[in-house]
Image: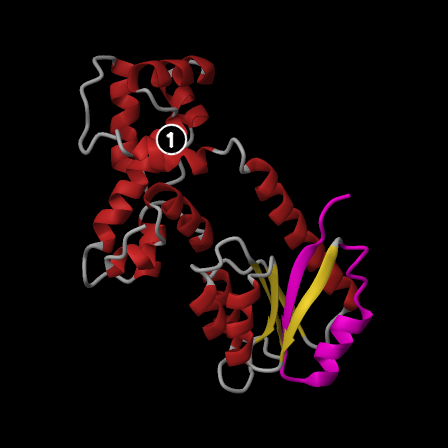
Amino acid sequence: MEERLRVLVIEDEDIIRKGLVMTTDWKALGLVVIGEADNGIDGEELARKLRPDIIVTDIAMPGQDGLSLIGNLVEELLDSEFIIISGHAQFSYAQQALHYGVKGYILKPIDPREFATVLSKSAEEIRARNQKRGGDELFELKELSASFPQSGRDYRDQYIQSAVKTIEAHYAEALNVADLAEHMGISERTLSALFKEKTGYTFLEYLTLYRMQNAARLLQQKEIQVQEVAPEVGYKDYRYFCRVFKGCFGVTPLQYKRGETP
């Protein structure tokens, strides 16, 4: 039987918080509530202590608002998913939530079916990520990065030279081996095999490591804020960027900027 994912609910209005906890069919969703908090400060402390899989939080709360709470936890709890429940439909709130990688933003009064759907999608994403983790390239990056070239190599192959130059010029854009192969007039399979043979890396590994190399360079610049780096190196999802960066360097982007070591 699949283990139930753990949920923390943070909401200052008792009737709403208790209503969510008592009326949601958590078992049917493969979830279990492991904690509740009625303010942002206690909620953040509890999140750090319990490290839940899913954190459901209001925005407007005493002590600390939900967006500040998420901002404080987003790098530390990289495997947790956040769901916001709010009485405010302001675009600025939704925009900031999106920036943090929040997948669910539910307006009050809460529709139980919508809440269950968002919970279910978050749970599916967590389980899919956990299943992939065993063989995912993301978790092999640290070892691969040790031998990654600091500057371009001469691979003495026109296709590979072209591919590497494309990565170096357009790494902040959406790149994939299929489009590149089509542009070169060769098959995706041929380019993939050739790239691995000549460089020792898959196309995705090389692109990811080159992006991480540039992310590290940007993080060393005092005037650059951590959250500005992700889009500069081709990542729209800040939380995914943090996971990749940590997989490569053993620390989060914020920890790296602070000079912390694994």
Viewed as shown, does residue 206 lie left or right of 66? Answer: left
Q: Is residue 16 above or below residue 71?
A: below
Q: Toward the viewer: 184 or 83? A: 83
Helix, strand, or loop for circle 1? helix
| Residue positioned 50% across, 34% down in the render | 136
Q: Which residue is mark 1?
A: 205
Q: Give coordinates of residue 197: x percent, y percent.
A: 34, 14
| Residue positioned 54% across, 34% down in the render | 134
Is residue 22 within the magenta segment?
yes
Question: Identity of the amino acid at label 1?
Answer: Glu
Q: Toward the viewer: 220 or 185? A: 220
| Residue positioned 40% across, 51% down in the render | 242
Q: Give coordinates of residue 56: x percent, y percent.
A: 62, 68
Which quadrant would the N terminus be assigned to in this image?
top right
Q: Toward the viewer: 156 or 252? A: 252
Q: Give coordinates of residue 123: x percent, y percent.
A: 66, 52
Total numbered labels: 1
Viewed as shown, does residue 129 lie left or right of 206? Answer: right
Q: Toward the viewer: 231 or 251? A: 251
Q: Quadrant of residue 172?
A: top left
| Residue positioned 18% across, 57% down in the render | 221
Is residue 198 within the magenta segment?
no
Question: Which region shows up in magenta?
Answer: 1-29
Q: Is residue 197 above or below residue 126?
A: above
Q: Give coordinates of residue 227: x percent, y percent.
A: 35, 60
Packing grade of label 1 (10 A; few <14, some 14-19, many >=20) is some
Viewed as shown, does residue 52 lie left or right of 93? Answer: right
Q: How is the image coloured?
A: secondary structure
